[in-house]
Image (cartoon, helix red, strand yellow):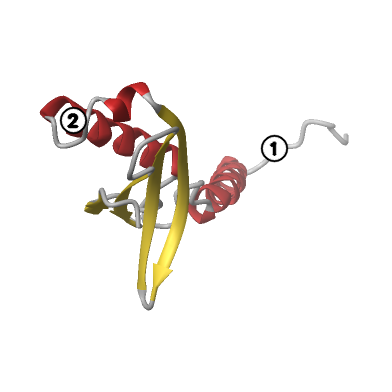
Amino acid sequence: MNDCFEHRNPLKLFTALGLGVLLLIFLMSVPLALAHGPKGHDGSEFTALEAAKKGIKLYEELVASGKLKESWETDLKNIEVFPRQRGEKREVVVKFTRSKDDPLFVYIFFTEKGNYSGSNFTGN
């Protein structure tokens, strides 16, 4: 008599299920391994928002310490963040503009990795 529940080899069934699970895990992990998110492969991108935050913090310290006159705080008109490249050197510039008095501009420079690299208080 032909039984619809034939005896199957449990080892073959276990091996097939195990291989299927391993294949599923592998296929699910490949996209995760290849993805690297918005900061690039090594997480070193310095964003404009990060530059603005660091620049403002340093700017506030300069005003508080008296290296920049108090009018830089009361007459502040605008803050800009933009990239700059000179030869091989790439920087992120945070530019502070005030509405009156000389100089009108203060520049704070960061490396493309976010390290402070200098300031310009002369406005040029």
**Badges 1 and 2: C-beta atoms under 8 Å apart?**
no
Q: Above or below — where is 76 with respect to 17?
A: above
Asked if residue 49 lies left or right of residue 32, the reply is left
The amino acid on which the numbered mark 1 sits, given as a three-letter code, is: His
- Residue depicted at 36% across the width and 76% down the height: 88
Mark sitting on residue 7: 1
Q: Residue 52: x and y, percent? A: 39, 37
Give the Cα distance between marks 1 and 2. Answer: 80 Å
Vertically, is 110 above or below 58?
Answer: below
> Can see residue 40?
no
User: Residue 101 at x, y = what percent?
Assistant: 35, 37
Residue furthest out toward the top: 74
Q: Earlier in the sequence, mark 1 or mark 2?
A: 1
**On the picture, is 91 further left or further right than 28?**
left
Task: Give the residue displayed 21% in from the left and 29% down from the top.
Answer: 63
Give the structural element (helix, strand or loop) at label 1: loop
Q: Quadrant of the C terminus?
A: bottom left
Quadrant hosting residue 47: top left
- How dense is the environment of label 1, judged by Cα within 10 Å: few (below 14), some, or many (20 and up)? few
- Point out the frontmost of discs 1 and 2: 2
Q: Which mark is drawn over residue 61?
A: 2
Determine if residue 2 is in view: yes
Give neighbour class at mark 2: few <14, some 14-19, many 20+ (Cα, 10 Å): few
Label 2 amino acid? Glu
Front-most of residues 3 and 29 = 29
Dot 2 falls on a residue whose secondary structure is helix
Query: Where residue 2 appears, x then y in whole percent?
Result: 87, 36
Residue 30 x/y as whole percent: 55, 53
The residue positioned farthest toward the right in the image shown: 1
Q: Residue at x 27, y 52 (%)?
A: 122
For the residue pair 113 and 118, the one nearer the viewer reads as: 118
> Which residue is pictured at 24% across the width and 51% down the height?
119
